[in-house]
Image (spheres, rainbow, N blue to C red):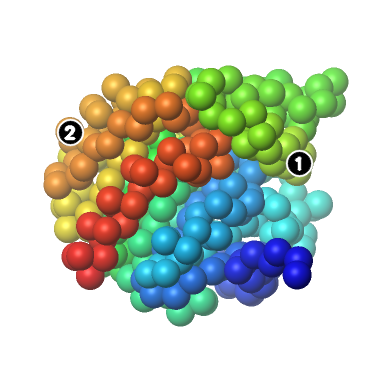
Amino acid sequence: MAKIEPITGRYIYVPFEGTEYRIFFEEAGEGIPLLCLHTAGTDSREWRHQLCDPDINKHFRVIALDLPRHGKSIPPGDWYKETEEYKLTAHFYSGILMAFCEALGLENPVVMGSSMGGNICLHLALHHEKDLRALIAIEACDYSPGWHLDWLHNSQVHGGEACATSVFGLMAPQSPDEYRWETWWYYSQGGPGVFKGDLFFYSVDHDFRELADKLSGNVPMYLMTGVYDFACTPEMTEETAQKIKGSECIIMQEIGHFPMCENPEVFKKYLMPVLDKIRAQA
Protein backbone atom coordinates (compact mmCIF):
# COMPACT_ATOMS: atom_id res chain seq x y z
CA MET A 1 0.00 0.00 0.00
CA ALA A 2 1.27 3.45 -0.89
CA LYS A 3 1.85 5.86 1.98
CA ILE A 4 -0.83 8.55 2.05
CA GLU A 5 -0.48 11.55 4.31
CA PRO A 6 -3.46 12.76 6.38
CA ILE A 7 -3.37 16.24 4.87
CA THR A 8 -6.41 17.53 2.97
CA GLY A 9 -6.10 20.59 0.73
CA ARG A 10 -9.02 22.82 -0.23
CA TYR A 11 -9.88 26.31 -1.45
CA ILE A 12 -12.10 28.85 0.25
CA TYR A 13 -13.37 32.21 -1.02
CA VAL A 14 -12.68 34.93 1.54
CA PRO A 15 -14.19 38.42 1.17
CA PHE A 16 -12.13 41.28 2.57
CA GLU A 17 -12.55 45.02 1.97
CA GLY A 18 -14.52 44.63 -1.25
CA THR A 19 -12.33 41.94 -2.82
CA GLU A 20 -12.88 38.19 -2.85
CA TYR A 21 -9.72 36.14 -2.38
CA ARG A 22 -9.43 32.48 -3.41
CA ILE A 23 -7.28 31.03 -0.65
CA PHE A 24 -5.76 27.58 -0.52
CA PHE A 25 -5.30 25.82 2.79
CA GLU A 26 -4.26 22.41 4.08
CA GLU A 27 -5.51 20.77 7.24
CA ALA A 28 -5.24 17.62 9.32
CA GLY A 29 -6.41 16.50 12.73
CA GLU A 30 -9.27 17.37 15.03
CA GLY A 31 -9.76 19.52 18.10
CA ILE A 32 -8.57 23.02 18.90
CA PRO A 33 -8.06 25.07 15.71
CA LEU A 34 -4.34 25.76 15.18
CA LEU A 35 -3.74 28.21 12.32
CA CYS A 36 -0.18 28.08 10.97
CA LEU A 37 1.36 31.04 9.11
CA HIS A 38 4.24 30.65 6.67
CA THR A 39 7.30 32.86 6.42
CA ALA A 40 7.88 35.63 3.87
CA GLY A 41 7.80 34.58 0.24
CA THR A 42 6.82 30.95 0.83
CA ASP A 43 3.66 28.96 1.51
CA SER A 44 1.92 26.33 3.64
CA ARG A 45 4.33 23.55 2.64
CA GLU A 46 6.61 24.72 5.44
CA TRP A 47 4.18 23.16 7.92
CA ARG A 48 3.90 19.68 6.37
CA HIS A 49 5.71 18.00 9.25
CA GLN A 50 3.38 19.41 11.89
CA LEU A 51 0.31 18.66 9.76
CA CYS A 52 1.40 15.01 9.59
CA ASP A 53 2.40 14.64 13.24
CA PRO A 54 -0.12 12.40 15.07
CA ASP A 55 0.93 13.79 18.45
CA ILE A 56 -0.11 17.25 17.29
CA ASN A 57 -3.18 16.57 15.20
CA LYS A 58 -4.59 14.22 17.81
CA HIS A 59 -5.75 17.24 19.79
CA PHE A 60 -5.48 20.08 17.27
CA ARG A 61 -7.08 20.81 13.93
CA VAL A 62 -3.92 22.00 12.23
CA ILE A 63 -4.58 24.45 9.39
CA ALA A 64 -1.92 26.02 7.18
CA LEU A 65 -2.94 28.58 4.57
CA ASP A 66 -1.26 30.23 1.61
CA LEU A 67 -1.66 33.99 1.82
CA PRO A 68 -2.90 35.64 -1.37
CA ARG A 69 -0.08 35.69 -3.98
CA HIS A 70 1.65 32.77 -2.22
CA GLY A 71 1.72 29.10 -3.14
CA LYS A 72 -1.64 28.06 -4.61
CA SER A 73 -3.44 31.26 -3.56
CA ILE A 74 -3.43 33.38 -6.69
CA PRO A 75 -3.43 37.20 -6.58
CA PRO A 76 -6.73 39.07 -6.80
CA GLY A 77 -8.23 39.03 -10.30
CA ASP A 78 -7.11 42.53 -11.30
CA TRP A 79 -3.55 42.29 -9.99
CA TYR A 80 -2.10 42.92 -13.46
CA LYS A 81 -3.65 46.40 -13.44
CA GLU A 82 -1.82 47.44 -10.29
CA THR A 83 0.36 50.51 -10.73
CA GLU A 84 2.33 50.07 -7.51
CA GLU A 85 4.46 47.15 -6.43
CA TYR A 86 3.10 44.67 -3.93
CA LYS A 87 3.75 45.60 -0.30
CA LEU A 88 2.30 43.57 2.56
CA THR A 89 0.99 45.69 5.44
CA ALA A 90 0.00 44.84 8.98
CA HIS A 91 -3.52 46.07 8.24
CA PHE A 92 -4.05 43.72 5.30
CA TYR A 93 -2.19 40.80 6.88
CA SER A 94 -4.12 40.77 10.14
CA GLY A 95 -7.38 41.59 8.36
CA ILE A 96 -7.19 38.76 5.83
CA LEU A 97 -6.27 36.29 8.56
CA MET A 98 -9.29 37.17 10.67
CA ALA A 99 -11.51 37.13 7.57
CA PHE A 100 -10.18 33.66 6.77
CA CYS A 101 -10.98 32.46 10.30
CA GLU A 102 -14.49 33.86 10.02
CA ALA A 103 -15.07 32.31 6.60
CA LEU A 104 -13.87 28.91 7.81
CA GLY A 105 -15.87 29.17 11.04
CA LEU A 106 -12.87 28.91 13.37
CA GLU A 107 -13.79 29.79 16.95
CA ASN A 108 -10.99 31.12 19.18
CA PRO A 109 -8.16 29.56 17.22
CA VAL A 110 -4.54 29.34 18.26
CA VAL A 111 -2.36 31.22 15.78
CA MET A 112 1.19 30.00 15.25
CA GLY A 113 3.42 31.84 12.79
CA SER A 114 7.11 32.05 11.98
CA SER A 115 9.17 35.09 10.96
CA MET A 116 6.66 37.53 9.45
CA GLY A 117 4.02 35.07 10.67
CA GLY A 118 5.44 35.49 14.15
CA ASN A 119 5.57 39.27 13.95
CA ILE A 120 1.92 39.53 12.93
CA CYS A 121 1.01 37.75 16.17
CA LEU A 122 1.80 40.97 18.02
CA HIS A 123 -0.68 42.91 15.88
CA LEU A 124 -3.31 40.20 16.36
CA ALA A 125 -2.84 40.44 20.12
CA LEU A 126 -3.37 44.19 19.98
CA HIS A 127 -6.48 44.24 17.80
CA HIS A 128 -8.11 40.79 18.03
CA GLU A 129 -7.30 39.32 21.44
CA LYS A 130 -10.94 38.52 22.22
CA ASP A 131 -11.13 36.26 19.16
CA LEU A 132 -8.00 34.20 19.87
CA ARG A 133 -7.13 31.41 22.28
CA ALA A 134 -3.34 31.79 22.21
CA LEU A 135 -0.48 33.04 20.04
CA ILE A 136 2.77 31.23 19.26
CA ALA A 137 5.15 33.81 17.76
CA ILE A 138 8.17 32.00 16.29
CA GLU A 139 11.30 33.98 15.33
CA ALA A 140 9.45 37.18 16.22
CA CYS A 141 10.34 40.49 17.84
CA ASP A 142 8.99 44.03 18.00
CA TYR A 143 11.26 45.36 15.23
CA SER A 144 13.39 43.55 12.63
CA PRO A 145 14.91 46.11 10.24
CA GLY A 146 17.20 45.73 7.27
CA TRP A 147 15.56 43.03 5.16
CA HIS A 148 13.52 45.06 2.64
CA LEU A 149 16.08 44.96 -0.19
CA ASP A 150 15.58 46.35 -3.71
CA TRP A 151 17.79 43.79 -5.43
CA LEU A 152 15.44 40.96 -4.40
CA HIS A 153 13.17 42.00 -7.29
CA ASN A 154 15.35 43.02 -10.21
CA SER A 155 15.24 41.97 -13.86
CA GLN A 156 18.97 41.22 -13.76
CA VAL A 157 18.67 38.85 -10.81
CA HIS A 158 17.22 35.34 -10.79
CA GLY A 159 14.50 36.10 -8.26
CA GLY A 160 13.83 32.59 -7.03
CA GLU A 161 17.42 31.53 -6.51
CA ALA A 162 18.41 34.89 -5.05
CA CYS A 163 15.59 34.79 -2.51
CA ALA A 164 16.28 31.17 -1.58
CA THR A 165 20.02 31.62 -1.21
CA SER A 166 19.68 34.86 0.75
CA VAL A 167 17.95 33.01 3.59
CA PHE A 168 19.92 29.76 3.51
CA GLY A 169 22.41 30.99 6.10
CA LEU A 170 19.57 31.67 8.55
CA MET A 171 19.27 27.93 9.19
CA ALA A 172 21.28 26.10 11.84
CA PRO A 173 24.24 23.96 10.72
CA GLN A 174 22.82 21.06 12.75
CA SER A 175 19.62 20.99 10.69
CA PRO A 176 19.53 18.05 8.26
CA ASP A 177 20.63 18.92 4.73
CA GLU A 178 17.47 17.35 3.33
CA TYR A 179 15.27 19.78 5.23
CA ARG A 180 17.48 22.82 4.66
CA TRP A 181 17.46 22.29 0.91
CA GLU A 182 13.73 21.62 0.99
CA THR A 183 13.28 25.04 2.58
CA TRP A 184 15.53 26.52 -0.12
CA TRP A 185 13.25 24.94 -2.73
CA TYR A 186 10.16 26.59 -1.26
CA TYR A 187 11.82 29.98 -1.42
CA SER A 188 12.92 29.49 -5.01
CA GLN A 189 9.31 29.29 -6.21
CA GLY A 190 7.76 32.55 -5.03
CA GLY A 191 5.97 34.91 -7.40
CA PRO A 192 7.78 37.97 -8.78
CA GLY A 193 8.24 40.61 -6.10
CA VAL A 194 6.39 38.63 -3.42
CA PHE A 195 9.37 38.07 -1.12
CA LYS A 196 10.37 41.72 -1.33
CA GLY A 197 6.77 42.80 -0.73
CA ASP A 198 6.49 40.56 2.33
CA LEU A 199 9.71 42.01 3.69
CA PHE A 200 8.13 45.45 3.54
CA PHE A 201 5.89 44.28 6.36
CA TYR A 202 8.68 42.40 8.12
CA SER A 203 11.19 45.27 8.22
CA VAL A 204 9.24 48.49 7.59
CA ASP A 205 5.54 48.36 8.42
CA HIS A 206 6.07 46.15 11.47
CA ASP A 207 7.49 48.49 14.07
CA PHE A 208 6.01 47.48 17.39
CA ARG A 209 8.59 49.08 19.68
CA GLU A 210 6.15 51.58 21.15
CA LEU A 211 3.22 49.16 21.24
CA ALA A 212 4.49 45.97 22.85
CA ASP A 213 3.96 47.20 26.39
CA LYS A 214 0.37 48.16 25.51
CA LEU A 215 -0.70 44.54 25.05
CA SER A 216 -3.07 43.50 27.82
CA GLY A 217 -1.69 39.99 28.27
CA ASN A 218 -5.22 38.55 28.18
CA VAL A 219 -4.29 36.22 25.32
CA PRO A 220 -1.38 33.89 26.15
CA MET A 221 1.67 34.55 23.97
CA TYR A 222 4.68 32.29 23.54
CA LEU A 223 7.73 33.71 21.78
CA MET A 224 10.06 31.01 20.44
CA THR A 225 13.37 31.82 18.72
CA GLY A 226 16.30 29.72 17.54
CA VAL A 227 19.86 30.53 18.59
CA TYR A 228 21.09 30.59 14.97
CA ASP A 229 18.64 33.26 13.83
CA PHE A 230 20.49 36.48 13.00
CA ALA A 231 17.44 38.19 11.45
CA CYS A 232 15.60 38.02 14.76
CA THR A 233 18.19 37.15 17.36
CA PRO A 234 17.40 35.55 20.73
CA GLU A 235 18.30 38.86 22.36
CA MET A 236 15.76 40.72 20.23
CA THR A 237 13.05 38.23 21.15
CA GLU A 238 13.94 38.33 24.84
CA GLU A 239 13.78 42.13 24.88
CA THR A 240 10.37 42.02 23.22
CA ALA A 241 9.06 39.39 25.63
CA GLN A 242 10.04 41.55 28.57
CA LYS A 243 7.67 44.23 27.28
CA ILE A 244 4.67 41.94 26.78
CA LYS A 245 2.65 41.19 29.90
CA GLY A 246 2.39 37.51 30.76
CA SER A 247 4.35 36.31 27.73
CA GLU A 248 6.75 33.38 27.82
CA CYS A 249 10.07 33.42 25.97
CA ILE A 250 11.59 30.15 24.76
CA ILE A 251 15.06 30.09 23.18
CA MET A 252 15.61 26.97 21.07
CA GLN A 253 19.01 25.31 20.70
CA GLU A 254 20.21 23.85 17.36
CA ILE A 255 17.53 25.80 15.47
CA GLY A 256 17.62 28.74 13.05
CA HIS A 257 14.98 30.94 11.44
CA PHE A 258 12.73 28.14 10.08
CA PRO A 259 12.17 25.70 12.98
CA MET A 260 9.12 23.91 11.61
CA CYS A 261 10.74 22.93 8.32
CA GLU A 262 14.51 23.06 8.82
CA ASN A 263 14.51 20.71 11.81
CA PRO A 264 10.98 19.56 12.75
CA GLU A 265 12.22 16.91 15.19
CA VAL A 266 14.11 19.41 17.36
CA PHE A 267 11.31 21.97 17.04
CA LYS A 268 8.77 19.44 18.28
CA LYS A 269 10.64 19.09 21.59
CA TYR A 270 10.02 22.78 22.23
CA LEU A 271 6.55 22.99 20.72
CA MET A 272 4.79 20.12 22.50
CA PRO A 273 5.08 21.62 26.02
CA VAL A 274 3.56 24.85 24.67
CA LEU A 275 0.66 22.98 23.07
CA ASP A 276 0.14 21.05 26.31
CA LYS A 277 -0.15 24.33 28.22
CA ILE A 278 -2.68 25.64 25.72
CA ARG A 279 -4.72 22.44 26.03
CA ALA A 280 -4.64 22.70 29.82
CA GLN A 281 -5.89 26.30 29.67
CA ALA A 282 -8.67 25.21 27.33
Upstream in the sequence, badge 1 or badge 2?
Answer: 1
As drawn, the residue found furthest toward the right would be 156
Residue identified by numbered label 2 = 242
Q: In the rendered view, would you say 65 is above or below 18?
A: above
Answer yes or no: is residue 233 visible.
Answer: yes
Say if 16 sits above or below 190 in the image.
Answer: below
Q: For residue 30, what is the image quadrant?
A: bottom left
Q: Is residue 118 left or right of residue 247?
A: right
- Where residue 233 sits: x, y (%)? 37, 23
Indicate left or right for 238 with 191 as reference: left
Task: Give the tally of numbered discs.
Answer: 2
- Residue under the image location 17 percent in, 58 percent down: 218
Q: How far across and down, in percent of the image, does residue 109 sit?
A: 37, 67
x and y percent of residue 176 in the render? 59, 31
Choose between 5 and 252: the one closer to the eye. Answer: 5
Locate residue 106, reporting x and y percent. Answer: 42, 75
The circle drawn on residue 189 is 1
| Amino acid type for the residue under numbered disc 2 | Gln
Position of residue 225 in the picture relative to residue 260 (left or right): left
Alpha-carbon span between mark 1 and mark 2: 37 Å
SS category of the residue bearing label 1: loop
User: In the displayed image of the protein, which residue is found farthest to the front?
Assistant: 1
Q: Which image quarter is the N terminus in?
A: bottom right
